[in-house]
Image: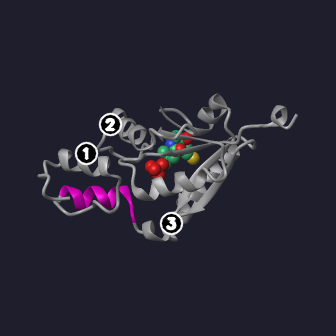
């Protein structure tokens, strides 16, 4: 009887993930305590120029979560709210770091909500360890030969070193 009434709680975790960082991974794993399924969605942010192709980003994320049945990875080039309608999800999951994220996140959440009232955005505070981690700074440091090993999953670190032609003794 209970099973018949069970409605799957599906959240979409959208972002650029260029590349995915330990901060993102932390939000996703904590999100699984609240949701039955999380779709990690590589969405299009017109204000960004990407280092990794969509295929590269999807491959890295799929590899990190290969043992998680509750996680799907997808990409979409249209409006986020349209993707939610197609996928049957009604929650957008986002991480929130220091104060600087607040205005941007608030604007996006309200804009999405304006388009459809069926959707709610749920924010998780970034893990303390990852408060100042960003894909942008990680790329900048890696491109100049700096170490980002502790801030990204191993496969991402390797991809960054390959991208910037850094030898395996660094990282
Ligand atoms: O990781 P990012 O770049 O901060 O993520 C932003 C993203 C990709 C979630 C946002 O740009 C987005 O939702 N893009 C899809 C297109 C869309 O719906 N834009 C309107 C957002 S209010």
The C terminus appears in which quarter of the rendering?
bottom left
| Contact check, label 1 and label 2, Cβ < 8 Å | yes
Dot 2, crowdedness within 10 Å: few (<14), some or many (≥20)? some
**The label number, if any, that marks residue 37 in the structure image:** none
With 170 as the anchor, is 115 left or right in this view? right
* Front position in the image: 6 or 163: 6
Report the residue marked by disc 1.
159
Mark 1 or mark 2, earlier in chain: 2
* Front position in the image: 86 or 116: 86
Q: Is residue 66 visible?
A: yes
Identify the secondary structure beneath mark 2.
helix
Dot 1, crowdedness within 10 Å: few (<14), some or many (≥20)? some
88 up-or-down from 20: above or below? above
Q: Does the numbered disc 2 mark a residue whose Cβ is under 8 Å from ligand 1?
A: no
**The label number, if any, that marks residue 127 in the structure image:** 3
Identify the secondary structure beneath mark 1.
helix
| Contact check, label 2 and label 3, Cβ < 8 Å | no
Point out residue 31 in the picture as x, y percentages from the top left corner.
Answer: 60, 52
39 up-or-down from 22: above or below? above
* Residue located at (23% from left, 63% from top): 147
The boundaries of the magenta stretch are 133-143
Distance CA(mark 2)–CA(mark 3) = 26 Å
Mark 1 or mark 3, earlier in chain: 3
* Residue located at (56% from left, 36% from top): 79
Q: Does the numbered disc 3 mark a residue whose Cβ is under 8 Å from ligand 1?
A: no
Quadrant in which residue 70 is drawn: top right
Distance CA(mark 1)–CA(mark 2) = 9 Å
Identify the secondary structure beneath mark 3.
loop
**The label number, if any, that marks residue 56 in the structure image:** 2
Q: Is residue 157 on the magenta stretch?
A: no
């Amino acid at each position: 009887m209970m099973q018949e009434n069970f409605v799957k709680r599906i959240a979409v975790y959208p972002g650029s993930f260029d590349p995915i960082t330990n901060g993102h991974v932390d939000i996703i794993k904590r999100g699984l305590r609240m949701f039955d399924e999380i779709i990690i969605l590589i969405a299009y942010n017109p204000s960004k120029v990407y280092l990794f192709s969509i295929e590269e980003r999807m491959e890295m994320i799929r590899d990190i979560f290969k043992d998680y049945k509750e996680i799907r990875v997808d990409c979409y080039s249209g409006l986020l709210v349209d993707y939610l309608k197609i996928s049957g999800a009604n929650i957008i999951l986002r991480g929130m770091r220091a104060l600087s994220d607040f205005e941007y996140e608030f604007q996006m959440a309200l804009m999405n909500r304006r388009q459809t009232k069926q959707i709610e955005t749920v924010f998780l505070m970034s893990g303390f360890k990852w408060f100042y981690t960003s894909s942008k700074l990680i790329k900048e440091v890696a491109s100049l030969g700096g170490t980002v090993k502790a801030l990204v999953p191993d496969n991402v670190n390797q991809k960054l070193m390959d991208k910037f032609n850094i030898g395996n003794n660094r990282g």
